[in-house]
Amino acid sequence: MSTLKKIPDSRLGSLSPASPEYNAETDEYFFDHSPVLFNEILDLYRTGELHVPSNCCGAVLQRELEYWKIPKCLISECCIHSYHSYVQAQNTIQSIRESFEDNILDYSPTEYRNSKMKKMFRTIWITLDQPKSSTCAKVFNALYLALVLLSVLVFLLSYQPYCRNETMTHEKLVYMKNYSTISLFQSVNLNNAKQVMFLTTEIHPLLDNIDLFCIVFFTLELFAHFLTCPRKIKFFTYVLNVLDLYLVVAMWTTFAIETQIEKYLNDSGMINFYTVLKASLVLRLLRFFRLMKQFSALKILFMSLKASIKELLLLFITFLLASVFFASFVYFAEFNEQDVFPTIIESVWWAIITMTTVGYGDMYPTSSAGKLVGIACAASGILIIAMPIAVVAANFSEYYLKNSERRLRGRLMKSKKKK
Amino acid sequence: MSTLKKIPDSRLGSLSPASPEYNAETDEYFFDHSPVLFNEILDLYRTGELHVPSNCCGAVLQRELEYWKIPKCLISECCIHSYHSYVQAQNTIQSIRESFEDNILDYSPTEYRNSKMKKMFRTIWITLDQPKSSTCAKVFNALYLALVLLSVLVFLLSYQPYCRNETMTHEKLVYMKNYSTISLFQSVNLNNAKQVMFLTTEIHPLLDNIDLFCIVFFTLELFAHFLTCPRKIKFFTYVLNVLDLYLVVAMWTTFAIETQIEKYLNDSGMINFYTVLKASLVLRLLRFFRLMKQFSALKILFMSLKASIKELLLLFITFLLASVFFASFVYFAEFNEQDVFPTIIESVWWAIITMTTVGYGDMYPTSSAGKLVGIACAASGILIIAMPIAVVAANFSEYYLKNSERRLRGRLMKSKKKK
Amino acid sequence: MSTLKKIPDSRLGSLSPASPEYNAETDEYFFDHSPVLFNEILDLYRTGELHVPSNCCGAVLQRELEYWKIPKCLISECCIHSYHSYVQAQNTIQSIRESFEDNILDYSPTEYRNSKMKKMFRTIWITLDQPKSSTCAKVFNALYLALVLLSVLVFLLSYQPYCRNETMTHEKLVYMKNYSTISLFQSVNLNNAKQVMFLTTEIHPLLDNIDLFCIVFFTLELFAHFLTCPRKIKFFTYVLNVLDLYLVVAMWTTFAIETQIEKYLNDSGMINFYTVLKASLVLRLLRFFRLMKQFSALKILFMSLKASIKELLLLFITFLLASVFFASFVYFAEFNEQDVFPTIIESVWWAIITMTTVGYGDMYPTSSAGKLVGIACAASGILIIAMPIAVVAANFSEYYLKNSERRLRGRLMKSKKKK
Amino acid sequence: MSTLKKIPDSRLGSLSPASPEYNAETDEYFFDHSPVLFNEILDLYRTGELHVPSNCCGAVLQRELEYWKIPKCLISECCIHSYHSYVQAQNTIQSIRESFEDNILDYSPTEYRNSKMKKMFRTIWITLDQPKSSTCAKVFNALYLALVLLSVLVFLLSYQPYCRNETMTHEKLVYMKNYSTISLFQSVNLNNAKQVMFLTTEIHPLLDNIDLFCIVFFTLELFAHFLTCPRKIKFFTYVLNVLDLYLVVAMWTTFAIETQIEKYLNDSGMINFYTVLKASLVLRLLRFFRLMKQFSALKILFMSLKASIKELLLLFITFLLASVFFASFVYFAEFNEQDVFPTIIESVWWAIITMTTVGYGDMYPTSSAGKLVGIACAASGILIIAMPIAVVAANFSEYYLKNSERRLRGRLMKSKKKK
Ligand SMILES: [K+]
Ligand SMILES: [K+]
């Protein structure tokens, strides 16, 4: 009995004939409890160390420790492993569950039962927001994605020369550059085919009309989406909705500028603003992340990236340190070589392209010392990448597995209900 | 007893003196059943949670749960892991077994016992279709593969200039281009060595004869294969047989065209048709997949690719999204640089070549902004590839291991039979 | 009983009625000890082999073997696995603990209790040396890191042409090269923009002043750090402190030389010394490793690299052997091609760049034999890297996991104390 | 009892009152045997399936099955996993043990006890053959490796222009090419710096003398090694000894030719023979594999490569198939582009360099179709490599781990002996 007193706060440590477990008749203590881990707990009293067999589930360990009132920190260093992996797994399961079963905005039943309009609003809302809720929602979602694809295609094609109509001959442009007072024309680099293309051509009317149709569609969708949203304020806490709003505003603004482009030709601030706005329309690509609502693997990939943020940060910092290091070394090693590695900062580009093993070949060391630095750089790159990436890939596998398990459980539940 | 009533449909929950397990004499219930997991099942009644030790085989768990009539969905979230991996392993084992022991087309005994011809047919069929069935089949299969190799070699060599005979001097070709009315000659690009080679040379007669021999052999083989096949319709459900048919037809067609090539010289449609047909003959390489019947590792590789189709799709979609993204960014970042990144779509090629870390160096950013995009692109590529590839590689290892286990079991069975 | 005599030194082997475990009344031996592994130990006496279930913790195994006085080398070859991984894990845990809880230099209580100055010294010491000890220390540390960043930036920018002021026109330099007697000017390569830049420009005064401020700050910090250090001798056993000393000395030396640069222009030894010293200032980048005190992942990365030193050595030796091998082969294979692979040693560069899959494209084989060597080289590179890197990555994951477990234990302890 | 008859040959199945385990007094059967797995074996009789807990060691399973006379093929498909991994581990352990404890050639005690010369021979033999046997052997081995290093360095340096003395001016060579009748001079390509170097220079005498010294040393070593070898015939079954012999013969032959080089200048057969022989001397690099005797990790790397031969073959075949495939596709896709992809076989080089992600950039597709093929090629390469490499890397880790375990056991044994 004296050994039991070692941990006085525990259930066994505080046993006395007064405890409810005491059976006076037989002079024995009776615990209506699982014998699992009882041996290990007795050993804890004997030796002061709690070792847990690795096949014991972390939840059982936690339950038993709580029942016997033993603090968890007594688990010995070598056996905390299984409890740790249980805690990790629980976190993963928890975050997956939250992300997949998050409380989607919805009308409260009281709200829409009384008002007929609210009911209709709710139908629209559900159709727009939850792609899997009904056949109609599925069709709408397919249409939406098709239009996203179309709008991305239009965006890509509008930068292809063969999808543009000529508005000005090349001779005219040369003339404009030399004699016009418009700064835009004066500053054009006639050797830059891209600049020339934008000044001498305009998007093919067909593409332009398709684009306009898409803008109108997305504007209406955003409008309907916002109008029928039950909690207007929460609506803009979703990144994809903010993106939608930005895209709609940016699209109409560029459209407005384009119609009156002649006015602004001399206003370089306006031209720059227009260019940035136009370029930012590539963000329409992000609309594809609506796919995440259906394609869970993509969601899992993002969740595991989020969960690996620490490892990625480590990768980033080590990478940056190492690249500046190798860049400086190669700069000094190649100091007497002309034409390559003009400054340290430009050498950083070389170091990173070498460490990622891309190796474009636009810069490479030519002296012996520089080549030694290059070899060290490539080798370090492989090492530095391999280590955190292994953890990130393992995280992804873990998330992927847990999601697969979650779905198995879902199937088991469904098959029980059917019975 | 009251705790047992928590799950009323289960065997313990429905116990009563009327159940067959009740022994009236001793007033006890007796179960002639394994005590494995009984503790855990009692704990389920006590605590409402079913935790399973991780060393317990999934099949045992399933058996016990069925015996005690407990629904599988009661397995707690943290312990479903081992059941999930059991289900996965069973699926893998199942698909490997199906693929290796699939019911090969064969004559029914009644069919070939009576007819002598059918018997002979069957012998030919077995010899042609199952490379491991007899010594004769092995020899034939080796011959077949040797001829496939030969035919591939002839195909490769027929595009080497030193394996072709001159039929027309270069001067003649220049003359033809300038004065002939035949469109084929008019459209030739004299700087393109490949076009010139095809117009001024023909395949060396030796190679041509070997090719002809191979065609005849494969035609006969296909004919014999089809003629002796017990189920003619099922024959063409095998991809390799369809391929064989296509190749034989395509080979004879090209052969026919070649003999009368002068007729068609002015018919550009015919010439294009001939070129495509000729190029498609590279598919003869696929005949090597007959090796799969003997070289099981190749089959396992294909099966695991098939099993990883979801991860590969994920990889493909993420890759495409990311590459269009980086392509757009680099296009705008390098807008003021001439000569590189002429359009967004051409930049996609750069983005993919960078993300796969191939890095040809035909395109690379030169401005600071472009270089930042390049760094992000290379880094994302490594990340995006690493994650699904880890799952795919793990799938392959799993299939490879299970196949190895299957073979161990086969050996154990054989060694028992010998005893 | 005779089977027990097989291992005479063991507790069971030396049992006799005289042993303390003997209970004369019941004629039984009683061991107040855990029954865990008793079955396995009995089996050891029966069969002579000790097999341990893989879920048994290594510490328990060790405890039991010591209790039963059985030598550890009796663990059978197939079951040593779990004991080995226990030993490995213990080593990992041990080295992590040592590295994180290493006895930081500190004043002994008796030292600083009596003297007021010592007390103040200790406060400064703790503030400077332990970034997490107080708010003040945190602020100072943030300032320190900001200045490190600033000093690195100044270093990088001082090599950018647009951050330098002209001191001499290019024409003057050409004149100096042709007519001056100063060797430095005579040896300049006018085509090398880097050499020209250094001779015709000086760092922008603003950057120079910031640099001076940083030097003063780091000098003061080092001085205060050293002055308040309780054990002066041990101070320089820390690599970062030696680095600090070197940097401060080197910085002041370069500064001194720069102020009197005209004197030394003709002294090429001095110029070389100055250049090397100046280049070595890039080591200031290493000051970032102070981050390791806060950012434990970086420490873990370094520890796992240290623990993988054997695998890295293996990688290095195999890589070197293989690269010299392929370099020799490609040299002979390409002997008749001009311009590429001029010597074997230069071919080693090609071999390594190919084996790491960087592939700059500055050298590549052009003959058939050379291409075969190239293919073998690339394939070997992938293989040689993949194998040890897998072990290194696994080591990192292990260290990372154990550190994560250590922190979980820390949290559990804290949460107990709060109660 | 009837259930026990299901497997009649087993120990339980053949129980009868006549069996030795029967105890007539108590009417019970008594087995003096471990109860481990008894439950599972009873379940086998009950359900016909043998499921084994995954923590049970494969050796115990084997022992129990043999004791109960149950054929191993009854292990169920889902539980063969642990037995399979046990068999695999045993194979690995076995091959490591064989390779490390292989019976090194040695004199039998009877041989060398009587003869004094034999005793001396044996001392020399042990010193030469077993680097770890004595301090003298260690010193000799260090010397040997130093000379290997030296001889490799001499080999590498002898191809560096600055380590060679001029024997003929460039003008003389031009004159020789034009007017000499010696074919060697006539065929020289004056633009090929390598050919010119060999004809106009000779190795620096110092290097030549060092080389001669190394040759003498290695000749003596081989002679002593062979002379003192107890089994002359077995001596040449070791690859490294054959290599030594070849190198010594080849070195003396080249040396002999070099002294009379003028004689053979016109004999192109002799010149070719000399060149090949000279080039083959790079094999001296392989002498470094003597390091394997001390550096066990290198040995493990080779063993795991040998054990992964099947996976590497799979990799090789898939790679070859895929590369010919992509080469053909890119050839046709780029048919109308001039200058790139001249023949399919040359395109194979491109395909392999792309699939290994080396990407030199000497060839790359320029048309849209070609780029699509390029993307597919790079992606396939990553996939095809990732899968078998994962298995190979896992094999290496397994071998590495088992070797580490073997060494732990060795240490445990030693520490017991010390006691
Ligand atoms: K490259
Ligand atoms: K590359």
Image: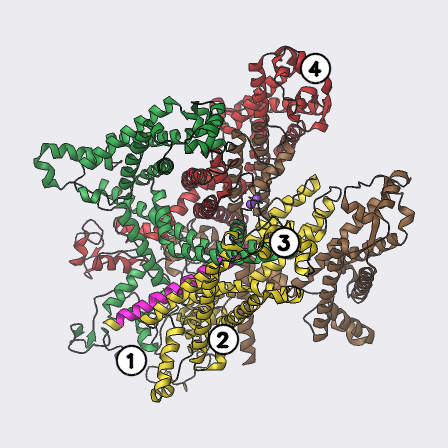
Chain colours: A brown, B yellow, C red, D green
Q: Position of residue A77 (x, y in %)?
A: 43, 48
Mark 2: which amino acid? Answer: Pro
Q: CA distance from mark 3 to mark 4?
A: 61 Å
Q: Are marks 1 and 4 on the same chain?
A: no
Please name which of the two marks, 2 or 4, marks the residue nearer to the observer: 4
Q: Which mark is residue B173?
A: 3
Q: Which mark is residue D3?
A: 1
Q: Is residue B345 left or right of residue D199?
A: right
Q: Is mark 3 within 8 Å of ligand 1?
A: no
- Toward the viewer: C121 or B332? B332
Q: Are marks 1 and 2 on the same chain?
A: no
Asked if disc 1 and disc 4 are in contact, CB closer than 8 Å, the reply is: no
Q: CA distance from mark 1 to mark 3?
A: 90 Å
Mark 4: which amino acid? Answer: Tyr
Q: CA distance from mark 1 to mark 4?
A: 109 Å
Residue at which label 2 appears: B71
